[in-house]
Image (spheres, helix red, strand yellow):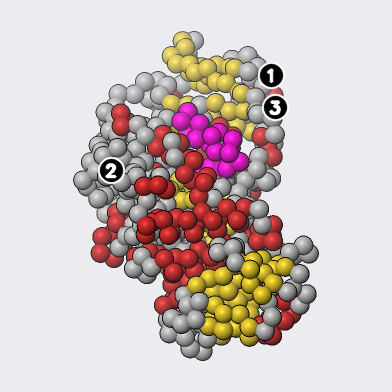
Amino acid sequence: MKTIYSALALSIASVAFSQKTLERVEPAFWWKGMKNPELQILVYGKDIAHNEVVLSDGIHIKDIRKVENPNYVFITVNTNEINVPKFTINIQKGKKNIGSYTYELKQREPGSANRESFTSKDVMYLIMPDRFANGDEKNDSRPELTEKANRSLPNGRHGGDLRGIISNLDYIQNLGATAVWLTPVNEDNEKVYSYHGYAQTDLYKIDARYGTNEEYKTLSQDLNKRNMKLVMDYVTNHWGSSHWMIKDLPSKDWIHWFNDGENGFKRSNYKTTTQFDTNASDIDKKYALDGWFDTTMPDINQKNPLVLKYLTQNAIWWIEYADLGGLRVDTYPYNDKEAMAKWAKAITDEYPKFNIVGETWLYTAAQIAAWQKDSKVGQIAGYNSNLPSVMDFMLFENMPKALKEKESWDKGMIKMYDTFTSDFLYPDLNNLLVFFENHDTERWNEIFNANPDAYKMALTLISTVRGIPQIYYGSEIGMRGDKNAGGDADIRRDFPGGWKSDKQNAFLPSSQTPEQQEFFQFTKKLLNWRKGKEVIHNGKTKNFVPQDGVFVYFRYNEKESVMVVINNNEKDQTLDLKRFAESLTGFTQGKEIISGKEIPLQNTMNVPAKTPLIIELKK
């Protein structure tokens, strides 16, 4: 015990505070009426395990777990057996009470278990809160948090916050987005680069530079009033090295520790394909899963039952507390997959309609599909993830190639078509997150030199194919960012108008430049049209192999049909409509939804160069 903690003190950090008998209780409160009535309560304080934990009102402790570190006790109770709204956790030394905490069991909101979550009817708007809008300048820096605001530093904290998002919900709603995904907003108290939020230091507390737990809940409620949803970015794979539990580990196996590494650190090899490689070497698989994402991000051991229960309850706590509309889980394949299957099942058992999308950054449909719930690919490997949704990184990878490559047998728009030929692998095709960029990738408008034509083709595609489209803040006004030259900070630029000192406020359409207007108006028209289109949300698809750089596909159901044409050529193209007779039979004309023009469906159709057409077919 002493040896472990001496090593950890040297490697990560030492406990730099004088502890009380009772420092923390997590979760701080819970709810009656959960499907799983068992509640694990973490109780933390100086040498707390050397004392007795007693609950008031004759409440029975079902299980009590003590670990290597005497500063922790984990108690389990059955909430169905507790008939009082509040009870007291008492820490007793002999007959003396040396610490106590009043624990509340709240009543759930009506319909809580059946809350609505994001689906293919939604469009997800991804925001990096520190770079979006500063609604409360008073919280830019906080005395209790290490890194202070400095907008002149590309990788520093710039001051964006929850209040800034709340004040710009009209903009997001008018754009046509219906779900908002925020990169992590829980406390990240690392010394530098804390703005991205992925090295969290307190899983139950919103970072005070973003606001409060109450403001986070207000954001969710305000979205719900607009029939919109808040999606939390959840991190199970790693925490920040300044996390209070990392500083004083409950047990050495709380994280993955490498005795031959510097300060316990060995970097992941990032080869998560080893998860399903039946021929993978043990060492490669170990470094993929147990290796740290970075030096300041200790790798969490989900195989430890106490860790898994902590992560599960924390996710449920936020869903219930903030009335969340979904979770996006970071670096999903880097976690222990068996443990995460239990994690996902526990959440969806509690909330049957709840959606969770995992970041499955792999490049083939088989590798991605294996992570989706009830996947036959996963079942071949004897695995069911219980994860409802996955991210279509194959489509993401092929989209810029399709638009940039010179057309040939296996290059150009055929890359797009080939992506969709693997759709049979997915058990829930409409529950894929489709995108062409995010906060970790090159900006689309950088790749294509802020060419609105390339943006329009890409947005048309993700908005009309199967799945849930996700767009990244700022691209709807043409924002750029060069990841190769400027690093992550450059693809995470401040939204113009989010700060009082900004010379331009692009949140106001009337203040947008003509170039910004072209991006914005196209996005707004397309996404708002998509809202009411069941044929796009859940319709069937018929693809036609691209010819001469033109990709044509139809979305259809029993009530309506939509023809999508994407012409990636530098010149206008004339389509012979006879080729599409099986999907055009019975239709005599169509209406192009962006231009509003009526299009006769007779012998041929002219498609302008570098242009997408979305045509509602009419009889």
Q: Nearer the viewer, residue 282 or 165?
A: 165
Q: Which numbered disc, 1 or 2, marks the residue that appears first in the sequence?
A: 1
Say which quadrant the C terminus sits in: bottom right
Identified by mark 1, the residue type is: Asn
Q: Secondary structure at mark 3?
A: helix
Q: Is residue 188 above or below residue 546?
A: above
Q: Nearer the viewer, residue 558 or 348?
A: 558
- Which range is magenta? 213-232
Disc 1 + disc 3, Cβ < 8 Å: no
Identified by mark 3, the residue type is: Asn
Residue at (50%, 26%) from the top-left corner? 28
Q: Secondary structure at mark 2?
A: loop
Residue 420 in the image, given as x and y percentages of width and height: 60, 73
Residue at (50%, 63%) from the top-left corner? 459
Disc 2 + disc 3, Cβ < 8 Å: no
Please check the rendered image and state whether residue 216 is part of the magenta-colored stretch, yes or no: yes
Q: Is residue 50 left or right of residue 112?
A: left
Q: Tag 1: Cα neighbours inside 10 Å, few (<14), some, or many (≥20)?
A: few
Q: Mark 2 — residue? A: 502
Residue 83: image tag: 1
Structural distance between the alpha carbons of marks 2 and 3 = 54 Å
Residue at (57%, 43%) from the top-left corner? 229
Picture quadrant of residue 430: bottom right
Residue 80: image tag: 3
